[in-house]
């Protein structure tokens, strides 16, 4: 359990909690691992568990009647998934698939609710995380309705690099998750061909660099201008 407490303490969601709160959460967590490409759950599945991501990258999406995916978000360390169905005792509203190897902590609803009653600070953290997600989803829907593809792609890249980044040896800042053009298209509601055309143009003008699904932001100011166009 001490190991799980240390893991929880390093996550933004639980950072700063006291020893009592961390102990209570650690007691009810179970480790869960996913291979790249493995599904955590599918839309429509019954849900009684929520998951805290320790490492790796998950994609939340829904597949339409035409077979096309609508991607709602990418999730990394410290984020929570599955809590909607867990709290409402309903069915999963979206599918979750690992884009890379993931480690998660699973928490069952029947064990979580008593802890939330005893530790209001944890409940507040979860409510804040859920509210933040709803705001991001609303912004995403607005962008898809009102912004051109180029502005949506630029904003998406800025969001990704702000969340997951490291300095690139060749200069600039690299987005640490490896993301394909198809996945970028899914995120912004555009075709892979549209994303390919824009990334080639931006690479040629020195705004970004994209090789083998590794994206490096070379000129952030230029990308910010594109996002506001």
Image (spheres, helix red, strand yellow):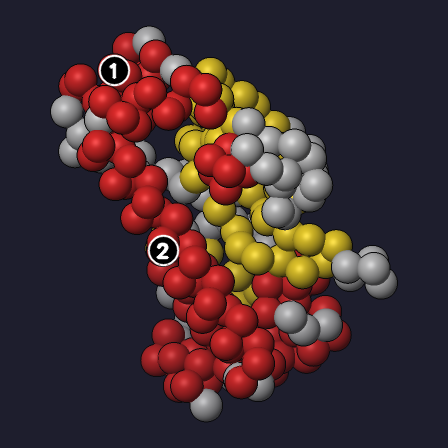
Q: What is the spatial separation of the Cα atoms under label 1 and label 2, in whole angstroms? A: 26 Å
Disc number placed over residue 132 in the picture, else none = 2
Q: Please tell me which residue is depicted at 63% across the width and 39% down the height of the picture.
A: 91
Farthest residue to the bottom: give it. Answer: 229
User: Mark 1 or mark 2, which has the lower sequence index?
Assistant: 1
Q: Please tell me which residue is depicted at 59% across the width and 69% down the height of the picture.
A: 188
Residue 172 placement (x, y as % from top left): 38, 65
Q: Is residue 93 above or below residue 30?
A: below
SS label for mark 2: helix
Disc number placed over residue 124 in the picture, else none = none
The answer to which quarter of the image holds residue 46 is: top right
Query: Which residue position is annotated with label 1?
Result: 23
Observer-nearest residue: 188 or 139? Answer: 139
Q: Please tell me which residue is depicted at 53% across the width and 85% down the height of the picture.
A: 146
Residue 193 placement (x, y as % from top left): 74, 74
Residue 73 placement (x, y as % from top left): 53, 55
Residue 23 placement (x, y as % from top left): 25, 15
Q: Please tell me which residue is depicted at 46% across the width and 85% down the height of the picture.
A: 226
Observer-nearest residue: 84 or 194? Answer: 84
- How crowded pointer 1 is (Cα within 10 Å; few <14, some 14-19, many 20+) is rated as some
Of the 4 image quadrants, the one containing the N terminus is: top left
Farthest residue to the top: give it. Answer: 1
Observer-nearest residue: 150 or 188? Answer: 188
- How crowded pointer 2 is (Cα within 10 Å; few <14, some 14-19, many 20+) is rated as few
> Can residue 76 be seen?
yes
Farthest residue to the right: give it. Answer: 66
SS label for mark 1: helix
């Amino acid at each position: 359990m001490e190991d799980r407490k240390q893991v929880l303490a390093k996550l933004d969601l639980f950072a700063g909690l006291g020893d009592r709160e961390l102990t209570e959460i650690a007691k009810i967590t179970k480790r869960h691992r996913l291979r790249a490409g493995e599904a955590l759950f599918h839309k429509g599945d019954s849900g009684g568990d929520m998951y805290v991501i320790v490492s790796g990258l998950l994609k939340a999406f829904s597949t339409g009647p035409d077979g096309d995916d609508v991607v709602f978000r990418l999730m990394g360390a410290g984020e929570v998934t599955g809590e909607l169905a867990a709290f409402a005792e309903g069915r999963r509203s979206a599918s979750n698939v690992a884009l890379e190897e993931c480690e998660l902590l699973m928490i069952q609803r029947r064990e979580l609710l008593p802890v939330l009653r005893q530790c209001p600070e944890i409940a507040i953290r979860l409510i804040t995380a859920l509210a933040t997600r709803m705001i991001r989803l609303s912004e995403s829907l607005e962008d898809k309705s009102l912004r051109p593809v180029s502005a949506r792609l630029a904003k998406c890249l800025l969001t990704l690099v702000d969340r997951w980044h490291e300095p690139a040896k060749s200069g600039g800042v690299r987005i640490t998750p490896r993301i394909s053009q198809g996945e970028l298209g899914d995120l912004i509601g555009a075709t892979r061909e549209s994303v390919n055309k824009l990334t080639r143009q931006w690479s040629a003008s020195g705004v970004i660099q994209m090789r083998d699904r590794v994206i490096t932001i070379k000129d952030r100011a230029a990308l910010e201008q594109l996002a506001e166009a």
